[in-house]
Amino acid sequence: MSRSVLMAWLTAPVVRFSSAAARVKLWCRAAASNAEIERGEGGRTGIPVPASRTKGEHAIAPLTPSLMKSDQRSSENQAFGLALAGRHTRAMTFRLQGYDHVGIRVSDADRAVAFYVRLGFAIDAEFSNELVVEMVSTDGTRINLIFNGRQRLGANNVLMDEPVNWPGYTHAAFIVDSLQRVLDWASTEQVAITEGPVDWGRRLTCFLRDPDGNVLEFNELVERQEKHPLPSTAANQPGSELTGDAG
């Protein structure tokens, strides 16, 4: 999606916030507005900055119902807007610095360890025991294999392959230096690429699964100066491996 199309979508009037798409749109509008203000361009509110503010010419104002058109407001909308405003105004006393690891539940310890070794991970014995094995790649990326999983017929993934979409973590996403090398590795190791490659604009992506059906995503980050050619493989459209829509 181009920037002009995205901004047109973000700034279009929102009549109701009851649907998930409308709520996401509201969040994006608030984030885009705040980003514009932070760059000193006035954003969508144009509210003057307090005297204590030293960055930019305008304050970052949360998107509350008072900033919406009256015909967009209902009791539901006001409650949602106030909740959103609360999220934006609470001060954080910590700063996220990244992931330490992702935990992956598996049903067969030996099979799972062998698979992730093939992917480039090695066991870190200092942080492993009979219940959980911590593995680390050469760049320091860590995963935990948790050995209390119960095997399902056909490696069916309860979060991704069922008609009902239950809440939960759907996939781990790794950054790689070359997506084509991932595709080549999968071909050599006879591991199916379950989706992709997909061009997301800032990254090229493909998906595969471990022996228990856990979804793994691999991303090659790219600079978008011009259209980037996709590596050669199957369908290049985003689908069920990202969303878990089995139907």
Image (tube, rainbow, N blue to C red):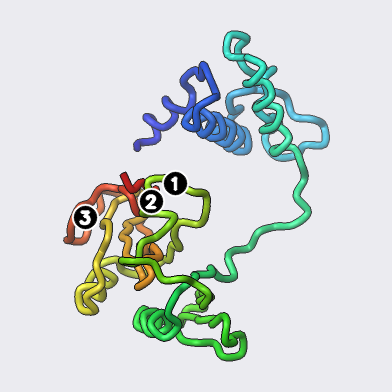
Residue denoted by label 1: 165
Q: 96 and 244: which one is in front?
A: 244
Could you say where residue 232 lies in the image, as x and y percent from the top left? 17, 61
> Is residue 110 toward the left or the right of residue 28 in the image?
left
Q: What's the distance in space between the residues labelled 3 and 2, CA to CA?
A: 34 Å
Vertical placement of residue 231 versus 105, above or below = above
State the residue lying farthest toward the right.
Answer: 52
Q: 49 and 170: which one is in front?
A: 170
Number of numbered discs overlaid on the protein picture: 3
Query: Label 3: few (<14), some or many (≥20) within 10 Å?
Result: few
Q: Who comes first in sequence, dot 3 or dot 2?
A: 2
Could you say where residue 220 lies in the image, as x and y percent from the top left? 35, 62
Residue denoted by label 3: 229
Query: Label 1: few (<14), some or many (≥20) within 10 Å?
Result: some
Q: Is residue 142 visible?
A: no
Q: Secondary structure at mark 3?
A: loop
Name which residue type carries label 1: Asn
Query: Label 2: few (<14), some or many (≥20) within 10 Å?
Result: some
